[in-house]
Amino acid sequence: MRIQKKLALGLGALFALVAFLAILSGFYINRLSADTKNILVANYNSVAYSREMLLALDEGIRLPHIQQKFEAQLKRQKANITEPNELEATERVNADFQQFKNGPGDSLLIYQIRKDLADIMLLNMQAIQRKSTIAGKTADKAIVWIAVSGTLCFMIAFTLLLNLPGAISNPIKTLTSSIRSITSKNYAERIYYNKADEFGDMARAFNTMAQKLEEYNNSNLARLMSEKQRIETLINNIHEPVIGLDETKKVIFINEEAARITNTRPADVLGKPVQDLAVSNDLIRMLIRDFFEPVTAHEPLKIYADNKESYFDKAIIPISIIPTGETEAHHLGDVIFLKNITPFKELDYAKTNFIATVSHELKTPISSIKMSAQLLENDRIGNLNTEQKELVESIQDDAARLLKITSELLNVTQLESGKLQLQPVLCRPEELIRKAVQINETAAASRNIHLEVRQPEDLPFLNVDADKTAWIFSNLISNAIRYSHENSPVTITVSAGKEQVLFTVKDQGQGIAPFYLDKIFDRYFRIPGSKKEGTGLGLSISKELIEAQGGSITVRSEFGAGTEFTVTLPAADNN
């Protein structure tokens, strides 16, 4: 039988029983209501009327208003005749009452009226008892029929509750389990359900699908093997080292280039945990360090390859997929990819060496030009006219600018090559500031800019390279003067903390736009549209020199209102 038909029959039978129970209950409730209403309306009212007439007799029937009360109750009783012989008794009461009204002194008539009223009350009391018995039988019958019907409904509903959910859920559970087995690539899974219902149709359809999937999987196995070999060939032909790991960190592939630089053979490493290989192979240990230690600053790897020191940039690429029908990604492994950047390193070294050589060679002729210009300004050599003096001053400025540029380029090359040697000595912060201010006094005076120094007494000593640190402060003050408006102040503030000394250089110039603040310490960066001279190296060199001495440099600027640079250097240990 079809599931739909079973559900229709079961639920239809249950509905029919519930409807029958409701109709039966309504029928007996209506009968009980009618019997009760009949007792209350007919017999109870007659007893009440007779009682009122008896009370009227006791109150004095000879009084006119009592007679009116008696006559009103008698009229109601006449309209409520429901029992046999009740009409005759009522007629007798009426006849005796009419005769009493005509001769009110007859006491025998009052006795007769009392007797007739007692007969009416007796008739109705007997009727109440009889109808109560009938109502009780009706109630007993209703209880029996309702109990039988309710028990039958409960048994049918309980049977449906036990059998119907299982009949529907058990095949669904079987189908769900089989589908999960199929998703695990167990294409030999089948459902054995031979009933002629919807679940039987679904089981047959599922078995057909599983059979086709099994055939498809078997037919594509050779193709998959071919694709696997193609991928392996592609990986082996990549001229960069590549190592593949599964989710348990076992080596699943390694190309020839990676095997060559790690001095291993693919057959010796495939399928083995990379942690075990790292025990006896320093290079592999270096490659997998990021898996087990916090990632530090990214530095190129120096590896001896191609009969020379080579540089490789390492990238670890996690492999994750979201399986069909799921929402969370599954981690399948990682690929270690090494990019050979040796040619770029060699070009960078050649560039650094070239800049260092050119800068060093330019320094001597520039210094000679500057000295010659100073000699021309000496009156003992000869007097110069106004135009000649202006030309000499221009030569002096250009020579000074070229000398500064070559010095900055030399510092950059020394920083890049690691040959910059710092010579830390104990020095006083106020001496460094004094030198920096003295260097920039002429430039500040030419623009009528006041250099204001604020520093307390008894500042702690610094253990830094005095010349290079003074150059840093001079560079910051020079920038502040260059970008300040004329007739505005530049404030240099020195303050001491618990273990450090803070230097602040603040101007009231045009400021720096917010989107350039994170770039001003980059090499060769200059704010677009700026007409001020410079190489864009000063702040970059300053930052590297400060950090090399254990300090830091930060900038805070409000566009249109000025800029503030803060240098923090550790105080020297007095012990």
Image: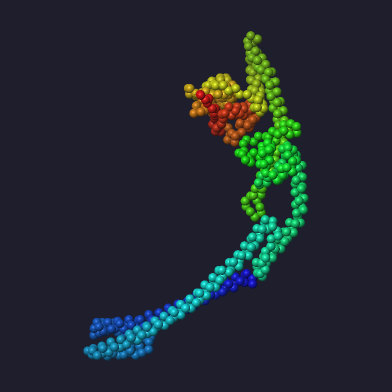
Q: Residue at x 56, y 68 (%)?
A: 162
Q: Residue at x 51, y 28 (%)?
A: 499
Q: In front here: 352 or 304?
A: 304
Is residue 535 something that shows in the picture? no
Q: Residue furthest left?
A: 105
In the displayed structure, 441 sits above or below 382; it is below
The image's colour scheme reads rainbow
Is residue 185 something that shows in the picture? yes
Q: In front here: 255 or 375?
A: 255
Q: Residue at x 61, y 29 (%)?
A: 544
Q: In front here: 156 or 554?
A: 156
Q: Residue furthest top?
A: 380
Provide residue 206's location: percent of width, then percent of height.
68, 63
Residue 61 placement: quadrant: bottom left
In the displayed structure, 96 sits above or below 512; it is below
Provide residue 281's location: percent of width, then percent of height.
69, 37
